[in-house]
């Protein structure tokens, strides 16, 4: 069995981001930061339009995307209550860096 040399790990560069989903204004989508997890598929969102909303993770997305505090997501505010929203997309780390470079995040 060969010994593993230090410093020779597989250091692959970060993947290049080619396509990033941005919020669509015609669908009233906004960028938001997850503030805290409230339990029962609910999160506290600090939206980029300055409103704090209670976000709901729909059942179709519940098991597919694991959301933690500090994640950047796309939320769609409810038409009936503006203080609530649905979480529809979660960004990965390379996508967040791309959003910061392009000026979507401040």
Image (cartoon, helix red, strand yellow):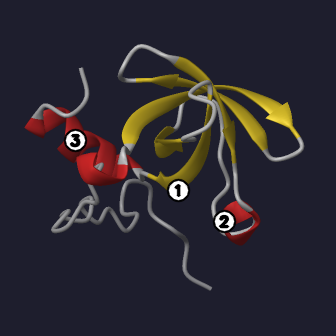
Task: From the viewer's perspective, tell me whether residue 41 is left or right of residue 56.
Answer: right
- Give the numbered dot on residue 88: 1
Q: Nearer the viewer, residue 100 or 86?
A: 86
Residue 63 position, x and y percent, is 75, 67
Q: Secondary structure at mark 2?
A: helix
Q: Secondary structure at mark 3?
A: helix
Disc 3 target residue: 99
Residue at image x 58%, y 48%?
A: 87
Residue 82 in the image: above or below residue 18 = above
Q: Nearer the viewer, residue 60 or 70?
A: 60
Question: Closer to the observer: label 3 or label 1?
Answer: 1
Quarter occupied by the N terminus = bottom right
Residue 40 position, x and y percent, is 89, 44
- Give the numbered dot on residue 61: 2
Lower sequence index among marks 3 and 1:
1
Q: Residue lying farthest top? A: 50
Task: From the viewer's perspective, tell me whether residue 4 is left or right of residue 13.
Answer: right
Q: Residues within 10 Å of mark 1 (few under 14, many from 20)?
A: some
Q: Residue lying farthest front? A: 80
Q: Residues within 10 Å of mark 3 (few under 14, many from 20)?
A: some
Residue 38 in the image: above or below residue 10 = above
Question: Closer to the observer: label 2 or label 3?
Answer: 2
- Give the numbered dot on residue 74: none
Quarter occupied by the C terminus = top left
Residue 31 in which image quadrant: top left
Residue at image x 40%, y 63%?
A: 9
Q: Residues within 10 Å of mark 2 (few under 14, many from 20)?
A: some
Residue 20 position, x and y percent, is 24, 60
Lower sequence index among marks 2 and 3:
2
In contact (CB < 8 Å): disc 2 and disc 1: yes
Q: Secondary structure at mark 1?
A: strand
Residue 90 in the image: above or below residue 49 = below
């Amino acid at each position: 069995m060969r010994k593993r040399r230090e410093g020779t790990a597989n250091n692959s560069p970060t993947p290049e981001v080619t396509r990033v989903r941005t919020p669509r204004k015609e669908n009233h989508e906004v960028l938001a930061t997850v503030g805290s997890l409230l339990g029962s598929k609910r999160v506290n969102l600090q939206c980029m339009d300055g409103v704090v909303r209670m976000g709901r993770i729909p059942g179709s997305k519940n098991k597919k995307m694991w959301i933690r505090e500090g994640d950047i997501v796309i939320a769609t505010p409810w038409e009936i209550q503006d203080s609530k929203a649905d979480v529809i997309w979660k960004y990965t780390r390379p996508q967040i860096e791309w959003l910061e470079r392009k000026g979507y995040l401040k």
